[in-house]
Amino acid sequence: MTKKVKIPLFLAVLITITSTIVNAQNQRPNIIVFLVDDMGWQDTSLPFWDKKTPLNQRYHTPNMERMAKEGMKFTNAYAAPVCTPSRTAMLSGLNPAHSGITNWTSTKKNENTDATDHQFAPANWNYNGLSPNPGIEKTAYATAFPQLLKDAGYFTIHVGKAHWAAAGTPGANPYNMGFMVNIAGHAAGNPQSYLPEENYGNITGKATPRAVPDMEEYFGTDVFLTEALTREAIKALDAPIRNHQPFFLNMAHYAVHVPIQGDKRFLQKYLDTGIDSTEARYASLLEGMDKSLGDIMDFVKKKGIEKNTVIIFMSDNGGLSQATERGGQENTQNLPLKAGKGSVYEGGIREPMIVKYPLLVKPATITDQYVIIEDFFPTLLELAGIQNYKTVQQIDGKSFVPLLKDPTIKDDNRTLIWHYPNKWNNAKEIGINYFSAIRKGDWKLVYNQRTGKKELYNLKNDISENHDLATSNPEKVNELAQLLGTQLKIWKAPMPVLKTDNQVLPYPLPGQTIKVSGTIKNSREVLQYAQIKVKQTGKQVTTDADGRYDITVDQDATLQISAKGHKQQTIAVSGQQTINAVLAPDSLYLSKLLIRKIKEIEPYAHFLQAEKQAIVKLTAAYYTTRQSFIKDLYLDHPHVQSPDKALAEFLKYCKDNDLLNGKDELFKKAARTLGFELITDASPVNMESMLSGSTAYRDIPYTSYNGYSQKLDLFLPKVTSAKSVPCIVFIHDGAWAVHKRAWFEAHARYMAAKGYVTANIDYRMLDAVTPLQCVYDAKAAVRWVKANAYKFNIDTNKIGACGASAGAQLAAILATTGNDAELKGDGNNIKFSDKIQAAAGFATPTLTGRKTWPVKGNGTLPDWFEKISPYKHVTPDDAPMMFIHGSADGLVSVEEAVDMYKLYQKNGILTKLEIREGEGHVFYMNMAITESAYQFFKQVFN
């Protein structure tokens, strides 16, 4: 049973609860969600379209207009078609298809609210609603965000309609969902009455479970329910404001849900206009709701907390548009939008939304980016400054805080999904009963679960969804249907059951076809413009410049894959959605491929130039041996750590056949540089357990010299964040002379799985350059990250570097020489800063000048030493750095790390030293070392 709060006792309890709140909490914003019930997109004098409509001219909502002038208007805000799915999505961050709460819940436990249907038996949905406790039948177990706010010190208040769960389950009681105060919230979805003379339904012998609780003070007065709830909300706010405690108010009006009863304060003005009496009563409900908004905004301003208070206005579904409940012609109440409440067309799901927050949101701003009600969960927690919170559910919502900062942000790749596998009522089925929908960009697909029909609309050009473009855009239909069906399957969304055979309806598919995609390559490189042909139909596509393709085919189709110079492959689709193929090159193509690779690398390796100078005679046998050397490294054994074995065989052939003219060293260096560019190396660490935690983007050029590019692999965390995240640049070891980026990939993968973006880089190496050029490359990599941060959700103020041995020296020089003009080099993205904010080094050569590496045998230092010595560059504004070193390192003395650590301390820079007792030089190929670095980065960035 819902606890009833008596005001005198309530005030005393508030004083007791809030007496321990610390001053530090004062800076956190107060949050008010002003949630209206059943209000349509057009139910206001504030236009949310690009023009004012007759409906906007009918209604009078001056406080919504005022709020929009002081805040931001969202023109593409969405909720679910009916109330409980929207309200639970807001509380849990789960899309209704994911939570399985797809219809409204009952005032009785274990009562399925679906109406009886001739074709379908009810879907297996969670008709008992949301639950904060596990193990409650037919509920979705989730952590509600008010509980997280409460745990973080917020005073949490619920006023008005709850309707999150069936009566008799924990979720029906707001106290169980994290609210400290509950006024009038329970299991019912509408009030029995708005009228005080009817005691809001609490009349002996006539009361139903829909009678509004907790409002005895107003029984028999002249206070309309909307006004009474507003007064109670303001009372509840007084104590946390007085005690300087941040609060969250869920101001969830029952208005404007049926019964449509007139608010006498505003009714006559609408009757005087001559409109239908039902519509006049409806308009008075809206204006009473709008007065409530104004009263709360006025109260917040009067209390001097307006600037630090977030107010979000929202509705839980579209406006009612059925003739049985509303006046006027059916399905005209939300024009220009199609249909209304219960429908997946725009009239049932597009909502009026406004956000006011003077400290963040500029006044009179508008965003056209689409958002959805589950986005409230991460948004409110981010606004409250709550990080690293734990939930039992995986959140579907995406924070719209970035939009509050910049309303011009556009994301057309995001998909929004609506799913209603239920029967609401027996109304005309205009998107109502057994429909699903998906929006991506301006395109929206509506799927009829009864018939399998798919409709396609371009909302930018056709907001009324009058022009079905499915026939003329079959590929877009298939794309969206595939996305919709795949996501519903991942979420295990409920589907209706066919009465004829008791089988669950399958998820939507793109007709009898599926979208197949993949990459075509030979054993080493991707194949541009390879042909993928459907054997049965002759339909054909080609791969793009990255070797990728996609094609829509029958599920049992056969693909014939071919490319110039390669042997054809035939692959049966058999329902597969991803088909990658590796084609074997023929001998002629192979020869051309290897020659092309030599020429591609020539600007860096200068192998052909050295070959002309060092080889006495270029015989056919020599060319055959050279091809074997290149093929061995590029195609047969690309994952070796060094080309030295293959190189030794190649050089032995040249010497045994007297082909070298004495310039052996020149030729060897060029051949070795070529060899390193042919191989990929491989990680010595088993990464299988890490692969699922990140998404890889490989072979990205980040800088180029004389036409030859250095590349990196980028790893993005699978669990995405609404906020931008740090990026760590990983730099492999190998004395600037051996290894490739793949050797260090495990470290990058590990940290990406922790939530950071990571860039694992190659750089030019000795034999071809000096260590100074290696520094130029490292700095170019940082600049590339900053230049492309907007594409990958990277926080440019949280860039780190992590390396081992020679790579650690490069990380250290990045930390100590940010924006040093002499060390920028001539790489790409010069206009961007190369300054980083943190670094970590394993076995770091800090180049202190001690008599260890890289001191030469005669005791002298290389001429590049001073310029690239991190130790020589330390100043107080350098980036924090952690040093992890083996005490028994015989190559780079542990004293190098100790000296640098002390110098950092002397300059007042945050630093940490971790000495691994008994460890030698290469101790760092385990993830415990990476975890230590991660904890340091986390400390710095937080």
Image (tube, grey):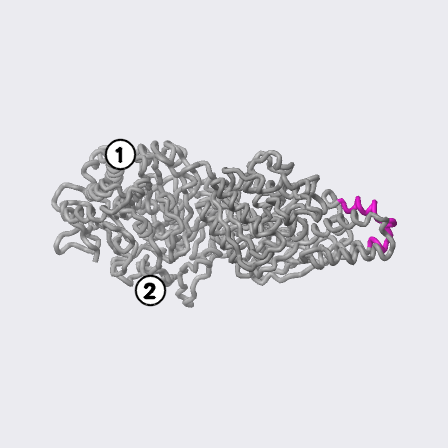
**Measuring 79% from the left and 44% from the top, which residue is drawn there?**
609
Left of 515 or right of it: where is 466?
A: left
Q: Closer to the camera: disc 2 or disc 1? A: 1
Distance, label 2 to label 1, CA atoms, is 45 Å
Q: What is the secondary structure assignment of the residue under circle 1?
A: loop
Residue 472 visible? The answer is no
**Measuring 47% from the left and 41% from the top, which residue is drawn there?**
908
Which quadrant of the rendered structure holds the N terminus?
Answer: bottom left
* Residue type beneath disc 2: Gly
Left of 539 or right of it: where is 874?
A: left
First in sequence: mark 2 vs mark 1: 2
Of residue 852 and residue 205, the one placed in the foreground of this image is 852
**Measuring 53% from the left and 57% from the top, which residue is drawn there?**
916
* Residue type beneath disc 1: Gly
Is 610 covered by the magenta stretch?
yes
Of residue 592 and residue 253, the one placed in the foreground of this image is 592
Question: How many C-alpha atoms fall within 10 Å of the one at disc 1: few (<14), some, or many (≥20)?
Answer: few
**Measuring 58% from the left and 63% from the top, which residue is drawn there?**
574
The region drawn magenta spans: 606-623
Of residue 898 and residue 839, the one placed in the foreground of this image is 898
Q: What is the secondary structure assignment of the residue under circle 2?
A: loop
- Rendered location of residue 630, percent (x, y): 75, 54
Left of 404 or right of it: where is 270?
A: left
- Rendered location of residue 30, percent (x, y): 30, 41
Left of 611 or right of it: where is 782?
A: left
- Rendered location of residue 781, percent (x, y): 59, 43
| Dominant SS in magenta | helix
Is 762 covered by the magenta stretch?
no
Residue labelled with disc 2: 135
Residue 304: mark in rendering:
1
